[in-house]
Image (cartoon, rainbow, N blue to C red):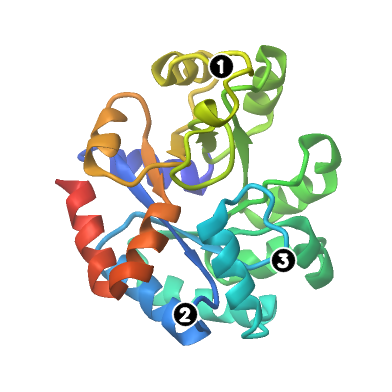
Amino acid sequence: MSPLQTFIEQQRKDKPILLMTHVVYGYPSIDESLALMRDLLAEGVELLEVQFPFTDPSADGPSILHACHQALTQRPTLARCLEDIAQLAHDFPASRILLMSYLNPLYRYGLERLPTDAAAAGIAGFIIPDLPLELADEFRHSCMQARIEPVWMLTPETPAARMQQICSAASGMLYCVSRRGVTGGNNARSQHPEQSPMLPLEDYLAAIRANTALPLAVGFGIRTGAQVQALHGQADTAVVGSGLLDVFNQGGAAAVVALVRSLRS
């Protein structure tokens, strides 16, 4: 069993669900993003997803897209990001940190050396939405050697055969996109009524469970305590990204802490 899976399963022994909060590195500044990460980790979030910004984050909606573009004006580097995460991992050993980004900035850094460097920084896993499983053999091998997990994503439109393939290759946990579209609060079904209907969320997650014993994280559009509670018994982790960012934009770090507490209640 991988270190990430072991951590999640240990945490789940006395918790109905875990929280993974999402922060864009460098937004609105590098120091402010790090301060927000510290606030979240001090609040006891089990998993922190740190997004290294990119100009075209294709899986992300307007809130995170805007944050990425603003963050890039700070001229962040992945090397500095890894250094900053290493300090967070040292200061908050009770939580785990995952690095999320897209292939372009990771290639620029060096995809072949990233797993070793990220593992040395205390990062538990990667979330790379535009890395297809078929092109990831070398990266997966490097991750295995470094004891760090590439976290694969499933969507409600993933065909059954593809779902089985991804579940068989996965380790650590799976990221289950809860609905069509990009991150944020828009209802993709209402935007595209002509598309085929999706399975209800509980049936979708049950189909994934039938193919894997890995922990399941569910994200996209989660921003209320009621939505988190609805996942009890179906998922292991609720992912809060755009909802957290929107609250931060409206009320700052104090409002984010209040949101996290409300998600726990």
Tell me the distance, in whole angstroms, between the alpha carbons under discs 1 and 3. 35 Å
Dot 3, crowdedness within 10 Å: few (<14), some or many (≥20)?
some
Residue indicated by mark 3: 55
Q: Is residue 260 visible?
A: yes
Q: Is residue 241 visible?
A: no
Answer with mark 1 or mark 2, whichever residue precedes in sequence: 2
Dot 2, crowdedness within 10 Å: few (<14), some or many (≥20)?
few
Q: Residue at x 53, y 46 (%)?
A: 183
Horizontal and vertical percent position of residue 252: 31, 74
Above/below status of 204 relative to 12:
above
Horizontal and vertical percent position of residue 128: 67, 50
* Along the viewing direction, whichever of 235 and 73 lies nearer the viewer: 73
Question: Looking at the image, which residue sits at the far left?
Answer: 265
Q: Residue at x 23, y 42 (%)?
A: 225
> Viewed as shown, does residue 95 lie left or right of 211?
left
Residue at disc 1, secondary structure: loop
Residue indicated by mark 1: 211
Residue at disc 3, secondary structure: loop
Q: Residue at x 43, y 44 (%)?
A: 185
Answer with mark 1 or mark 3, whichever residue precedes in sequence: 3
Closer to the eye: label 3 or 2: 3
Horizontal and vertical percent position of residue 20: 40, 51
* Along the viewing direction, whichever of 100 and 140 lies nearer the viewer: 100
- What type is the residue that disc 1 sits on? Asn
Tell me the distance, in whole angstroms, between the alpha carbons under discs 3 and 2. 26 Å
Residue indicated by mark 2: 87
Answer with mark 3 or mark 2, whichever residue precedes in sequence: 3
